[in-house]
Image: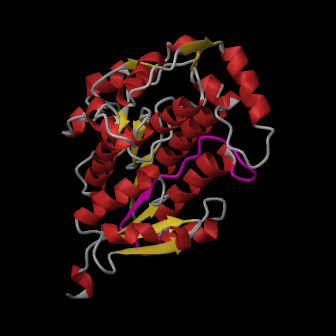
Amino acid sequence: MTLANLPPLVTVFGGSGFVGRHVVRALAKRGYNIRVAVRRPDLAGFLQPLGNVGQISFVQANLRYRSSIDRAVDGASHVVNCVGILHETGRNTFDAVQEFGARAVAEAARGAGATLTHISAIGANANSESGYGRTKGRAETAILSIKPDAVILRPSIVFGPEDSFFNKFADMARMSPVLPLVGGGKTKFQPVYVEDIAEAVARAVDGKVAGGKIYELGGPEVLSFRECLETMLKVTCRKNPLVSLPFSVASLIGSIASLIPFVTPPITPDQVRMLKHDNIVSAAAEAEGRTLKGLGITPTMAASVLDSYLVHYRPHGQYTGTGKAA
């Protein structure tokens, strides 16, 4: 195979994260060469079996340092940015990672002449009261000003084997006699399967998704916070009571928990602010076809997948209900 006939190179920032690893797998199946840009390449080796020998390589990169971004993008035909954080720690702030970092990736992609696919989030809004939503929104504006042909994907809460939503509450249900319903559990979500997001990214890299647009990715169901937890409890065969927790109390708990060093808080005040708003696909996106269905992807039901990875949270694991010991 001559150099001219080599498969295109795709740089995936955050390729070892929850969404990133599924994006890498989807791209590997399509035959792309993949360069995974992560802060700790030594911890990303688990991705190599997702492709053929030599198909997946690694490079050290940190979105706070522009030189490392340029190095990671050099020679790539496509760039995918999967990096995002749910809470701030040390120098990894929303401003540094989700705004400055995203802008730097877009500038590097433009310099390399590469196409860009950026994963944002429903709730992204430059005027949001939440730091998470605000920096996501500002990043989108910056990206489209730098790369007008960029593809921006906004998923609702994402579910899959390594998710931080259903897994978190399923684990909490094993230890806590009750589960909290922040704000009464009325916030609406549209859980979207991580494999569906990965497929959307892969189609964007294939050049089958129109650039310069923001796509909102949600699953086939709109569920309230309460309904999400009820679904999780049903799958895990548990009966923990659900207790309403006012936003103010949840925010106070998050503030106190955030002061404990080296411990990931169960919730932060910023996340509480995000929960005050529904996290679903907008009517405008539906009407204009800027959705999974508009991309030709059939959204996956959460109930059809949750059982496959929440089973170990059952009282007796896979043997729950069979009469066998765990």
Residue 129 position in % (x across, y down): 66, 25
Residue 3: quadrant of the picture = bottom left
* Residue 76 is covered by the magenta coloring: yes
Q: How many callouts does the rendering have?
A: 0
Identify the residue shown where x is 59% and y is 70%: 68
Res 189 visible = no
89 shown above or below 234: below
The residue most toward the bottom is: 2
Q: Is residue 113 left or right of residue 8?
A: right
Q: Choose between 254 and 2: the one closer to the eye.
A: 254
Q: Residue at x 69, y 51 (%)?
A: 92
Residue 214 vs 278, above or below: the answer is below
Front one among 177 and 67: 177
The picture quadrant where one finds residue 246 is top right
Name the side, left or right, on which 296 lies relative to 80.
left
- The quarter of the image holding the N terminus is bottom left
Q: Main secondary structure of the magenta part?
A: loop
Q: Which region shows up in magenta?
A: 73-92
Q: Nearer the viewer, residue 58 or 214?
A: 58
Residue 286, given in percent of the width and then of the height, sits at 29, 24
Q: Is residue 135 among what the camera can see?
A: yes
Q: Position of residue 101 (x, y in %)?
A: 60, 54
Q: Is residue 322 magenta?
A: no
